[in-house]
Image (tube, rainbow, N blue to C red):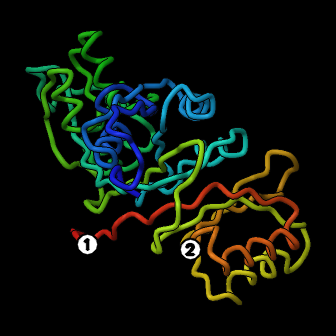
Amino acid sequence: MSAGEINLANKIVKVAFQGEAGAYSEDAIYEFFGSRVQPIPCKRFSDVFRKVEDGDVDFGVVPIENSIEGSVTQVYDLFLDHEVKVCGEVVLRIIHCLIANPGLKINSIKVVFSHPQALGQCKSFLEQLNCEIVPTYDTAGSVKMIKERSMVNAAAIASERAASIYDMEILARDIADNPNNYTRFFILSKQDASPTGNDKTSIIFSTKHVPGALYRALGEFAQRGINLTKIESRPTRQKPWEYNFYLDFEGHRLEPRCIEALEGLKKKAIFVKVLGSYPKAPEINNVI
């Protein structure tokens, strides 16, 4: 789905995201919706879910997985607690910059702040700096903090746009360990998207803790020729060593074969929640 496939009625839509102005999630908002949006910053991912659920905003944007660091598990868990739908996805190349107050030399840095995922993606670069590493709640928020506190021996890892917004200096660009650094974002709404013929569906399910239960559950998709694009387990948070499975598959939940697969899954699972169906994001072609 893109902004053109969502009925925006030529209005400026409110879109919630976690972080401060200049966060990568805000970049994802502009990538997906274009310029006719009002980004609404939130302190926590749960605030984004709550604002969508309560109707305070039209949409929300949350990161769901990174090509280097893997899934954003906190976001996955929030789908269990909130009644929102996934209506779109967008994949964004992440270009990390080392940012500091103007005039600071890179060899004077004693501490670097950023979101834990960004710090993990730049591990090799940070090891060369040989400085203290401090995780924070947001990339752009880290830039804002060292700006407001006039921290003279500190830097942050964030986007080039964050440096511009807060009038800070970029000491190094594209510092991630792997240049093929992409983050996939989910677009949240009160309802999912209509079929387009090029869709994906995301679900959560759990099975009985018995031999072959997962095999039989996944067989519902295999016997109907439905391709699975992602499967991941997360603790149920109810009983130790029991898990929910987060699954993405090709097809829309309203397609006959997908309806049949989901109905079959419900007979073999003890819990199924459909997060939503949505058009697939364009394939990544410019791998470095």
On the image, the x and y values in percent for residue 172 come to 15, 41
Please give left or right for residue 168 compared with residue 225 in the image.
Answer: left
Please give left or right for residue 121 compared with residue 96 in the image.
Answer: right
Residue wearing tag 2: 251
Q: Nearer the viewer, mark 1 or mark 2?
A: 2
**Alpha carbons under labels 1 and 2: distance apart:** 22 Å
Q: Looking at this view, is 20 or 52 the one in front?
A: 52
| Label 2 Cα neighbours within 10 Å, binned few <14 / some 14-19 / many ≥20 | many
Q: Specify the quadrant that holds the C terminus.
A: bottom left
Three-letter amino acid code at the position of disc 1? Asn
User: In the displayed structure, would residue 118 be above or below residue 257?
Assistant: above
Q: Earlier in the sequence, mark 1 or mark 2?
A: 2
The image quarter containing residue 81 is: top right
Would residue 198 be seen by someone viewing this image from the given angle?
Answer: yes
Q: Looking at this view, is 121 or 59 the one in front?
A: 59
Three-letter amino acid code at the position of disc 2? Gly
Q: In the rendering, which numbered label is found on residue 41?
A: none
Q: Specify the quadrant that holds the N terminus.
A: bottom left
On the image, the x and y values in percent for residue 282 come to 34, 67
| Label 1 Cα neighbours within 10 Å, binned few <14 / some 14-19 / many ≥20 | few
> Which residue sits at x=68%, y=87%?
224
